[in-house]
Image (tube, rainbow, N blue to C red):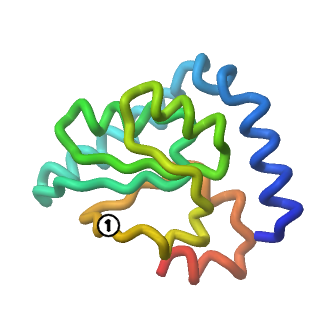
Amino acid sequence: MGIDLRSFLREAYNTKAQERDDTAIHEWKLEERGNFLSLLAQEKKKTLLEIGAGSGKDSAFFQKQGLNVFCTDLSPEMVKLCQEKGLDAKVMDFANLDSLNNSFDSIYALSCLLHLPKEELPSVLN
């Protein structure tokens, strides 16, 4: 993802952070989140990395279910909202997570990878 696109996305999400946090989660997203939680429980997962965490609504849900959650987002305003929810969160680009010294037994991403140019997808998934 080029610097211009990253800057544009960072600014767009910074500007609308509180508005996005105040918006109700779509039913289909709640269903997907519930399905993912069931899978995590089934596989006895304990730690979760959420990339593109936004304001932390999903991460807060997973944390309340007993998971040890770490959030990343490109937007400092979104990370601030995560931290206000009591989440461990850091401003990070999901294309550059190498500095994380933690290991996680699960990763959650919902609707954030759509911003990624197709040619960057393989390296981000790795």
Depth check: 43 or 100 in front?
A: 100
Measuring from the top left, give residue 102's x and y in whole percent: 32, 66
Measuring from the top left, give residue 62's x and y in whole percent: 29, 38
Instruction: Read off the residue under disc 1.
Output: 102
Question: What's the residue type where badge 1 is placed?
Answer: Asn
Lateral position of residue 29 relative to residue 65, left or right: right
Residue at x 65%, y 42% (from the top left corner) = 76
- Compared with 58, 118 (above or below) is below
Residue at x 71%, y 81% (from the top left corner) = 119
Residue at x 62%, y 76% (from the top left corner) = 121
Measuring from the top left, give residue 10's x and y in whole percent: 75, 47
Depth check: 108 or 100 in front?
A: 100
Q: Secondary structure at mark 1?
A: loop
Depth check: 35 or 88 in front?
A: 88
Quarter-of-image position of residue 55? top right
Lateral position of residue 76 relative to residue 70, left or right: right
Quarter-of-image position of residue 120? bottom right
Quarter-of-image position of residue 75? top right
Residue at x 31%, y 47% (from the top left corner) = 69
